[in-house]
Amino acid sequence: MKEHLRQFIIANKELLSRISGEELEDIRRLMTSGVAVRVLAYFCKHTEGTARDVMEEKGIPEASVYNALVRLSRMGIINSDRKTPKPRRSPGGPRKTIWRLK
């Protein structure tokens, strides 16, 4: 077992002992997606950001980032709470969504 994972388990032993079967299944599903784990790691470090921020820092393709954002959102881990402000006289197009840990 990797040392950082062992330390995480030891540090969260009490919390992990209270997790239900359904919650364990959610964790298993999350852990089977390496991209979702990398995206989650981004938000643990930065708290909030856009899909582009994640793509640039983690080097993950756009579609994979959006799939991971949807997965983490459905699990109730992150949410999209606002859009970036649109500058006056901007060329148009959609505003970027800002995602953050709940």
Image (spheres, grey):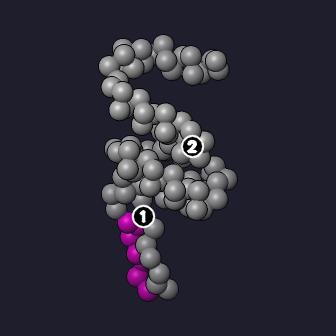
Q: Position of residue 45 (x, y in %)?
A: 51, 40
Q: Which residue is mark 1?
A: 97
Q: Secondary structure at mark 2?
A: loop
Q: In the image, is 91 to the left or to the right of 21?
A: right
**Badge 1 amino acid:** Thr
* Quarter of the figure that contains the N terminus: top right
In the rendered structure, are the residues bearing label 1 and label 2 in contact, judged by CB atoms less than 8 Å apart? Answer: no
Q: Which residue is mark 2?
A: 33
Question: What is the quadrant of residue 12 in the picture?
Answer: top left
In this view, the mark in front (1 or 2):
2
Q: CA distance from mark 1 to mark 2?
A: 22 Å
Indicate whether 35 appears above or below 2. below
What is the magenta range?
A: 83-90
Which mark identifies residue 16?
A: none
Q: Secondary structure at mark 1?
A: strand
Q: Position of residue 101 (x, y in %)?
A: 39, 45
Indicate whether 87 appears above or below 4. below
**Badge 2 amino acid:** Ser
Q: Position of residue 58 (x, y in %)?
A: 63, 49
- Judge whether residue 85 is colored magenta: yes
